[in-house]
Amino acid sequence: MRSPHLSSRAVLVLTLLGAASAQILFYCTEGACKAGCKPVECDGGRLIQNATTCGCCPICVKPLGEGARCENTETA
């Protein structure tokens, strides 16, 4: 029969690996902002500067009308 410590260690290792891979997804390199930003048109919304994941580009936040469909559009 397996030791419960072995199972606990396996779960701990898998949890740590998952956390490490999640950090890679949100890591910004030194050159992340060198590519430039796509133009953002923001009629009827609010332009927020440096709001993308790495803080490089602006985003537009528009209020939704009642019953409007909620959609996210990646612009950076």
Image (spheres, rainbow, N blue to C red):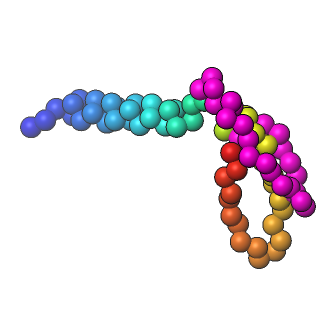
Q: Quadrant where the N terminus lies?
A: top left
Q: How many numbered marks are there? A: 0
Residue 39 coordinates in the image, percent (x, y): 79, 48
Majority secondary structure in the magenta region = loop
Is residue 9 visible in this depiction of the protein? yes
Q: Quadrant where the C terminus lies?
A: top right
- Please tell me which residue is depicted at 63% across the width and 23% down the height of the picture: 30
Horizontal side of 25 relative to 3 (left or right) equals right
Residue 49 coordinates in the image, percent (x, y): 83, 39
- Please tell me which residue is depicted at 83% across the width and 71% down the height of the picture: 65
Q: For residue 7: magenta?
A: no
- Please tell me which residue is depicted at 50% across the width and 32% down the height of the picture: 24
Is residue 54 visible in this depiction of the protein? no
- Please tell me which residue is depicted at 88% across the width and 52% down the height of the picture: 46
Seen from the viewer's position, the closer of residues 62 and 11 is 62
Q: Quadrant of residue 6?
A: top left
In the rendered image, the residue lying farthest to the bottom is: 67
In the rendered image, the residue lying farthest to the left is: 1
Q: Give the magenta-colored segment's residue range.
A: 29-52
With respect to residue 34, does 76 lie above or below? below
Residue 69 coordinates in the image, percent (x, y): 71, 71
